[in-house]
Image (tube, rainbow, N blue to C red):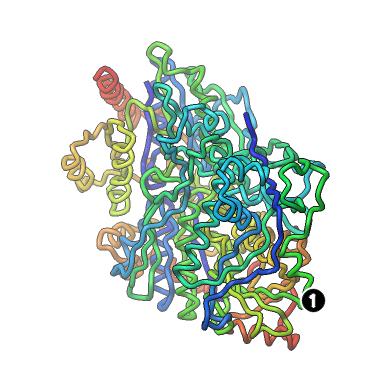
Amino acid sequence: MRLAILSGKGGTGKTTVAVNLAVAFASARATVYADYDVEEPNGFIFLQPQIVSTRVVTSTYPVIGEECEPCGVCSAACTSHALAEVGGRVLVFPEICHGCGTCTLACPRGAIREKARPIGELRSGTARDGLACSEGILREGETLATTVIQRLREFAERDAGRGAQGSIVIADCPPGSSCEVMHAAEGSDLALLVAEPTAFGLHDLGLAVRLARHLELPAAIFVNKDDGSGFIDRYATQAGLPIVGRLPFDLEIARVTARGALLMDDRRYADTFIELAAAVSGLAGRSRTA
Amino acid sequence: MPRPTKCRWVGWDTDVTYFKPRGVPLRSLEEVGLTIEELEAIRLKDLEGLDQQSCADRMRISRPTFHRVLRAAHAKIADALTTGKAIRIGGGHHVHYGGESEGAGRAGTGEPSVGMREKAGEAGAVRIAVSAMGPGLDSQVDERFGWCTHFVICDADDPEASVESHENPALAGASGAGIAAAQFVGGLGVKVVLTGSLGPNAARVTNAAGIQGYALHAGMTVGEAIASWKAGDLPKM
Amino acid sequence: MNYQLAVVSGKGGTGKTTVAAAFADLAGAVVMADCDVEAPNLHLVLPHETLQARDFSGNHVATIERDACIDCGACESVCRFGAVHSQDGEYGIDSATCEGCGACTYVCPQDAVTLEPLRTGTLMLSQAAGGVFAHAELALAADGSGKLVTQVRQLASGEARASGRNVIIDGAPGMGCVVISTITGCQAVLAVTEPTQSGWHDLERVLNVTEHFRIASFVAVNKWDISPEMTEEIERRCAERGVRVVGRIPWDPAVAEAMARQLPVTRVGGPAADAIRAIWADISAQRPRQLPLKEV
């Protein structure tokens, strides 16, 4: 079973919900937590896993060999403008290369070879109760977040496998509504949308709902920083989406998470996530059999 | 898997390099650039009436590539004829095989001739490119290099008579606008660029192309920028 | 040259838009740009009227002409993004995964694959009280948000040049492509963080990016009173790397109230508004120049 934790807006508490939910599941069944917010991964701050393996994510870039007789075909073929033929030679700009390999195909003299270039890293380890944790980290100055996300998906979920009996994958997705989120969320059994009851929060919840519908994922809402205004509840009723949990607006919760501590370790809040685990597995199970 | 050969072989040469609509002053004209191999594609297909495969064989490229070249040529000419633009012929990536003979060897035979753009570069005058917000010498300059809408290009000694305007092709790409723009003006034989600033990537290209950049200020027209540069008032980058 | 200031955050939800909207109010005549094209919010607190909206095609996507295709699979063998798939022996392109690189067009023996422009968003120019406002909305699940951000920047810069005004940019969370497009060519960046472990972690990464691109950076700690200890820790670490913390903004219910009333917080008042006002006075007095570019 795979759960995608989405939010649209950043900072709504997506990671707070994802890590605490993962811990709530881990005591009862095989659980994988994967942090797909590769630009700013934060889950490990809370889970503090023992890192057991790391892997470098690479992309390729062209290296021009001596066979080159600058004809400009490669630079004309490159839609990223990562190659320029000028002054009788070809210049390469690795940092904007997407690694598509079109230049290699286009070169009439077979003069282009490709070299690997690190763009990020994957790390995995184990936290309490055998919770398997993975994260992807994009290098500063790099732009190929999608590549890191795709590699992480293979890396984190291949063995953990949705196939394993009763196991669960919690995918902590990036904020926003772009293709990066899509690559992290698609193929899940349920999208859990974390929302806060503010004007910005409501607007961006709308985006997350549209994205879930686009990906044909059943969705449920978790209300964070609930101030009792019923703001999100009214929207949820209108949209026909269930609310499966809520955390109150409480500066104490902000202080706990600011320290990097888990709410599951605080008796006042642990039940919220244990109940949430039951609710989402019920919903996701239903959507799988449907 | 077959890999199409991308160097185009061209079997003739032409002295005519420019067509323009009658009665329109050159300085207010936009132009399209037709490469030598595009002209060759039209000549073989439309004038000699060969089938596409034969044309492709003559030019030593794959049929799909020939089709692409031909389509690009048709589109450019249609654009020029219907919207009243000038046509400049030259440049591109071709090797001259010196004759109509189909049997010219794949490599080593036939003297590769110099492309038109090199000929233009040899004319002596220093070619200047100015990043601008529109065509012509009266347009406002644009401080952006990669992202300007137009490049106004002319010879230093007589800007009025030699001015030509090009839409910036770099705008069409997904990234690396500065790189593409620098390569574009370099390919037109430009040796001096007047613009607001050059990013590090664009600067690498201009250095390799032997292009010197000078910093202009917003609010000038292209003509004024060129005059300031000639007077030595624009700082070197 | 017009002065351009970007407000970024690294971590989302730290109060970037609240600060940017307040700056817009304080700056008076200014051009605004919302570069968070994936989840734009600035328009919710800047009363505005949209003057123009147009579709933007930031990407190309390969399409296979079925009549010409012989289902040889050459395209699939060269696609590195897994965008070509076959169903019942017929090949097709998944437009959401296609990067538009054109590798497939180079190998198709039938010339059946072409690159077509793909709509990736809507670009808008609006009139707000203090001046024009450039913003956009990315099409759902689209690629190329960085390019749409560049378009928003273009639009704002053009308006700024025409009117001789400065530009204030509301950035996107993160530190990748979209943020790089947001800060390129800016004279200064203000990073708004919150005093949490995550806030610091993300701030550090976004500062690495602004440093990489050599743009002068300042930091403001929002909701600092959630953790005075962490606030001091952030201030100390920023000082260590030579980044100035220009202010602390307290947690203030007026922020949520302003948002609900669709106003910049400076119009509602309160301690947060006062703190932002002081930060604006500090930053706008500085007009830091872009650091010299490294020799490449």
Q: Nearer the viewer, residue B113 or A153?
A: B113
Q: Is residue A60 left or right of residue B98?
A: left
Quadrant position of residue A277: top left
Q: Return the x and y of residue C238 as percentages of the image width and height.
A: 61, 55
Dot 1 lies on which element? Answer: loop
Quadrant position of residue A5: top left
Q: Nearer the viewer, residue B100 or A152?
A: B100
The residue sitting at 51% across, 36% down in the picture is: C110
Residue C181 seen in this snapshot: no
The residue sitting at 37% across, 27% down in the picture is: A188
**Residue placed under numbered mark 1 in the picture:** B124
Q: Return the x and y of residue C1 as percentages of the image width and height.
A: 58, 76
Q: Give the residue type that dot 1 points to.
A: Gly
Residue C241 seen in this snapshot: yes
Q: Nearer the viewer, residue A164 or C90?
A: C90
Q: Return the x and y of residue A51 as percentages of the image width and height.
A: 60, 25
Q: Is residue B37 left or right of residue C171?
A: right
